[in-house]
Image (cartoon, grey):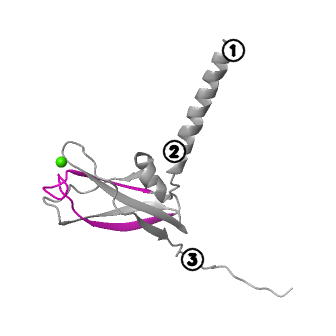
Amino acid sequence: MKNKIMLSILSIIFVIVTIGLLTNSCKVQADTKQVNIHFQWTTVGDDGLLGAASVYSLRYSMISDSLVNNWNLCKSITGLPTPAAASGLIDSVNTSLNLNTETTYYFAIKAADNVNNWSGISNIKSLTIADDIAPAAIIDFNGTIR
Ligand SMILES: [Ca+2]
């Protein structure tokens, strides 16, 4: 009985730690700079390159492997367009994100057809957010002889 209770407690701790690690692997702290990003890609079809896809999922992470291994836990970008009416056309989206400066973020996109068959992950695009905002100028600089 004691062993069963101990095993249950250990199982619960394992699950909590695992969920924590998975969640952290895609964690994005978004708080330092509003960044406008234009994404663009060539559309794919409903079946491979035939027809038109139905929906996109565009996600990002500070860890590129997270996009490959934990896609559903990575942050999602909303406001994506409905895929163009045929493959081979260009789709795009402008988005505004609050991101940490001096940090590299990784972005990727997937497409699904009308019965929720999801494509593989696209190539991964990395963007490093520069800190290009200088301190404000000091406006009360003074000197006195003492
Ligand atoms: Ca299909």
Question: In the rendered structure, which segment of residues is drawn in magenta?
Answer: 33-60
Across and down, in percent, residue 40 comes to 29, 67
* Image position of 92 (left or right of 124): left
Residue 101, relative to residue 83: is it above or below? below
Q: Identify residue for label 2.
A: 23
Tell me whether circle 2 and circle 3 mark residues in contact (CB < 8 Å).
no
Q: Quadrant of residue 92?
A: bottom left
Q: Quadrant of residue 85?
A: bottom left
Q: Is residue 93 visible?
A: yes
Q: Identify residue for label 1.
A: 2
Q: Residue furthest top?
A: 1
Q: Is residue 74 visible?
A: no
Q: Quadrant of residue 114?
A: top left
Disc 1 secondary structure class: helix
Q: Is mark 1 within 8 Å of ligand 1?
A: no
Kindly report the distance in space between the C-alpha atoms of the residues bearing marks 1 and 2: 32 Å
Disc 2 secondary structure class: helix
Amino acid tagged 1: Lys
Query: Which residue sits at x=83%, y=88%?
Result: 145
Kindly report the distance in space between the C-alpha atoms of the residues bearing marks 3 and 1: 61 Å
Kindly report the distance in space between the C-alpha atoms of the residues bearing marks 2 and 3: 33 Å
* Image position of 71 (left or right of 25): left
Give the foreground label among 2 and 3: 2
Asked if the magenta segment contains residue 126, the reply would be: no
Quarter holding the N terminus? top right
Looking at the image, which is closer to me, 139 or 97? 97
Asked if the magenta segment contains residue 48, the reply would be: yes
Amino acid tagged 3: Ala
Q: Identify residue for label 3.
A: 134
**Who comes first in sequence, dot 3 or dot 1?**
1
Across and down, in percent, residue 144 comes to 79, 86
Disc 3 secondary structure class: loop
